Amino acid sequence: MATHVLTPATTAYRSGLYEWLTTTDHKKIGIMYVINSFLFFLIGGFFALGVRAELAQPGLQIFKDEHVYNEFFSIHATVMIFLFIIPMLAGLGNYIVPLQIGAPDMAFPRINALSFWMLPMGGILLLAGFLASGGAAAAGWTSYPPLSEVGPTKSPGSGQDLWILSIILIGTSSILGSINFLVTIFKMRAPGMTLFRMPIMVWTMLVTSVLVLMATPVITSALVMLFIDRNLGGTFFDPFHGGNAVLYQNVFWFYSHPAVYVMVLPAMGIVSEVLPVFSRKPLFGYKAFIFATAGIGALGFSVWAHHMFTTGQVFLPFFSLMTFLIAVPTGVKMFNWCFTMFRGKLTLSTPMIFAIGFLTMFLIGGINGAFSAAVPVDFALHDTYWVVAHLHYVLFGGSVFGVFAGLYYWFPKMTGRLLNEGLGKLHFVLMIVGFNLTFFPMHILGLEGMPRRIADYASDAGWNDLNLAASIGGFIIGISILPFIWNVFISLRTGAIAGDDPWEGNTLEWATSSPPPPYNFDRLPEIRSERPVFDARHPHLRHKPGELADEMGPA
Amino acid sequence: MSSPPRRGLAPEAIVAGGVVVLLVALVAAVFVSGIGQNLYPPDAATSQAKDTRGLYDIVFALAIAIFLAVEGLIIWSIIRYRRKPGDDELPPQTHGNNLVEIIWTVIPTVIVLYLFAISYNTLNTVNAVSDAPDIRVHAVAMQFVWKFEYLDGSGNVMATQTVPYYATTSADCAQASMTNAGCGGMALPVGKKIQITLDSPDVIHAWYVPRFLFKRDVIPGQTNKFEFTIDPGDAGQAFRGQCAELCGTGHRTMLFTVLGLSSPDYDTWLKSLVEITNRTPPPVPSGAATLQLTAQNIQFDKTSLEAPANQPFVIDFKNMDPPGVMHNVQIRQSDGTTVIADQPTIDGGNEAQYQYQGLAPGTYEFICIVHPSIMHGTLTVP
Amino acid sequence: MTSDVATLGHEETGIAGRPVVVQEGHISRGISNPILGMLLFITSEVMFFSGLFAAYFSTRAQNAANGGWPPKAFEHTLNPLSLILVATVILITSSFTCQFAVWSIRRGDRTGFIRNISITFVLGIAFLVLQAYDYSLLFGEGMTMGSGPFGTTYFTLTGFHGAHVFGGVLMLGVILYRGMAGQFSAKHHDAIEAVSLYWHFVDVVWIILFTVLYLL
């Protein structure tokens, strides 16, 4: 590599606090996104542990006032969705997309900074609800009216309003970010990098950004209308004054369903980066992958009412059909990943292990989702712990494991240091065991009839043991984070020096130093496929993607 | 291009194998411990539920098959295709295979279309609503009370059963369902077509009975309707039900029971419920001490009351909230647990003369069963 | 090597003797970044208004079936042949003057640009003033945000539109100022193109709003 190598010990610039507060460098902004999102991961986890601590045994042990319990699970989900997973993936994308396309930065660096700083502000607004009279929002992260309207037994007090304002602020941050990503990806690719030579991570960020751009404003409109109902005498959702409670659900889920693809597609992108590198062969079916991703994005807009099957207000056959169909492109991706590993030469480093964790756990989440697509079965399972199991298998078993794969994979690029493999594997083992112990029993609890969002359950319903198991699992998940935090802490100081390309990567970020210089690249290798760095390393094997090929040769 | 034979297991392989064994052990433990059969829904108690259960079984079988196949492929790849240390040769750089892509697009499409077809079929059975059901019940869900109104042929209310409070066990619930002043629920004849209409005056609730494999939202401003027929073999069984849509602080307390009775037993039950519904309250004994208490804005107007010792007394209770908001005055031990005296709930805009037996001197708690966390006070008997 | 290299940089020898492109400068091809960004932003705004329109149509259909739409009390409040028609004509005219301003600057005619954009700016403010006055008339007739679904939907839709007009007026003010400071030329005026796209969007939304609320 003809790049001037900047080793961490001789970094030409030292970043002080002022530099970080005012930076418009996508790499620093990306790192701040990651750190901020991780902090909110811990905060969201705290609320989850509160919920699990209460549910471990029948009887109200901790939350004598059920309202506070309702606040805990409402804020848990809100924090995890809007302040952890979506921004974490946006932040990893922010860091890596310009590097992977050979650009010096994002298209609008100042808007990039603004997008970031709106997040801690939104988080503070949301959590400030706990200080408001009446407490934080307690109508679930879905905040259905009439429960989320004003009234003595509904949601009086400003906690719900703070929730609305915070989501609007965070949503705006997302939308600005999506504009940035789209312009960057369409306009700032290095010469030779056609759309069909972009890394899959970039493709997933592209489709995700289209979803964010088109869907997020719709939830803004729903929340604006709820705010008007609550504070300006509006009657959008008040059924006793000419409004309609189900209208909110339709507008809300029109965003919130595509949102789940926003929460998982970039994680799939990460897995699609990690698997080929650690299998030492290309991603199987690169183009099919892209079409499957675009297909998921498009179909994702047509299934929203499957969250509303039990309202009696939904054209059931259409939404059931579309929900079943979306399993097809998802399956295509799953098979392509499996066949990337098949007949490869796998190195089970920590990023790879987390990527495999994604595959195994997301598969379960996808399968148990199919049950709910069958409408009569959904009549039994909706609003029970089965759904809690499903959503956590896809969002935790899927996205969170994908996030950790990305963090372990790109930490060396970001910091110039390697993370400790032993601690990484300990993290993985604890996390996957804790995760399954927590959420697998919830399938059974849901089938047996345990509804969601209840502070307590009858002592003779037969749910005691499974709830206790789930609560123990939850605390194991909490413990599993500790080796990760410790790992980051010590590796920043004394981790092995990573060098430009510790993993023998395929994509352009590995063609510059670790960490990269502010301008990213001095010079770029020739780009003639989706694996330019691989090609540079193995010039005899260069191939156009999509061709049938079984070529071998000396490396 | 063959690889040199492996010599011993790498440490990562041992860890990987260990995790796999652990996961398999967990899954096995789930099955061996007897809760494996709980990966199925509970036994279906209605004909519609049996159809749903049939659909579930098919989906489940396909799910297990796909799960085993794909997980198996993943785990096998991890074990078989490990890179040996020192092996720097690249594996075959297969980019893809169009035929295979088509195969695993078309076959899953066929499978999901099949699943859609069978679930659409079952849906038509489960969702069917007729013009002439045998029994009509109008279920009203409120914060945090269920009210079941039995309708006659012309849609008029014959009898009302209210379900006011949270029982700690469902056995209590079932036992109390035979009277009007228990956590109760609705009794229904087995083998007959039951039609339930759902309404709410406040927020969204959901009517859910797990053994019926069914729930339906109760949405203010619209009346949902569904039908079912309880299996005749289930006569005498009580099925637990619960609100399944977050409706506020009392969401966890909105339990109810569906009691399946043979037709003669049901007729007897309904007759007694009609009597209870139409019963006029007994006159107030003259000279009894009368306490005044009002409920408004989901609050009692007093948080402390005083009653004379060892004498019957009356609470003149006014519910000044709007219709749809139910209240009552229940007396408990001072620690809030044991119920000393219960009273039926009254709807907003109504008044009741609650009569109580004499109490021994001491301190007691009084609550509204529907809103216990915000409507409570102390009753002192000197 | 492709023509990209010939215009963008020079070739060097990199690792393993493979060619490496060293970039020197860049070509701006196709749509510029700020204008693409504005088009995407407008797309997101279209989706926001779509949510509000969906709520409007759903509310209207439900109420038309139950009690009539408009409700009796407000049957004649939304008369298209009134002040609001004047406001509509003003806003449509301002789109024309805005486009004249764009054509002016594309020709390098700075004076023409400033003249046309000033007129657009004034017309935009006039629209807002007329809208505010119209609101006061409606309040006088008892139609408010809280007077029922008719009022809620009307004021929400027109209110957010007005907020967007206000934002557009601010943007027009900024490019007016920058234009007077001589910051634009025939070759460098991305901000003007972007703002004009936004202004046309705001106008199109009004045409749809006017049609739906007043004519249908």
Image (tube, coloured by chain):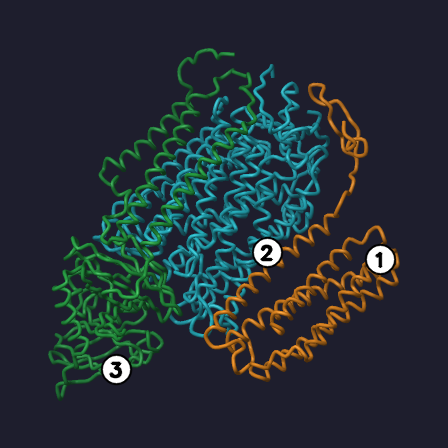
Chain colours: A cyan, B green, C orange
Looking at the rendered structure, the kind of residue marked 3 is Glu
Image quadrant occupied by the C terminus of chain C: bottom right
**Residue A311 higher or lower than A349, as above or below:** below
Q: Secondary structure at mark 3?
A: strand
Q: Percent x, y for residue C111?
A: 88, 63
* Three-letter residue code for mark 1: Ile
Name, please, the residue furthest toward the bottom.
B286
Residue corresponding to mark 3: B351
Task: Using a 10 Å C-alpha cutoff, classify the residue at mark 3 as few (fewer than 14 neighbours), some (14 to 19) or many (20 or more).
Answer: some
Which residue is rendered at x = 68% and y = 43% of the image?
A: A186
- Picture quadrant of residue A417: top right
Who is closer to the viewer here, A345 or C42? C42
Is disc 3 in contact with disc 1, using a CB cutoff of under 8 Å? Answer: no
* CA separation in Å, label 1 and label 2: 32 Å
Dot 1: within a 10 Å radius of its alpha carbon, few (fewer than 14), some, or many (20 or more) residues?
A: many
- Residue A172's tag is 2
Q: Going by the image, does B163 lie left or right of A260?
A: left
Q: CA distance from mark 3 to mark 2?
A: 52 Å
Helix, strand or loop under label 1? helix
Give the answer, above or below, for where C158 lies relative to A498. below
Give the CA separation, mark 3 to mark 1. Answer: 78 Å
Disc number at residue C105?
Answer: 1
Circles 1 and 2 on the same subunit:
no
Quarter occupied by residue B6:
top left
The residue at the point 71 percent across, 21 percent down is C18
Percent position of residue C150, x then y: 54, 75
Amino acid under disc 2: Thr
For mark 2, name the chain. Answer: A
Label 2: few (<14), some (14–19) or many (≥20) C-alpha neighbours in 10 Å? many
Splitting the image into 4 quarters, where does residue A542 fall? top right
Coordinates of residue C96 in the picture (x, y in percent): 78, 65
Kindly identify which numbered label has been placed on residue C167: none
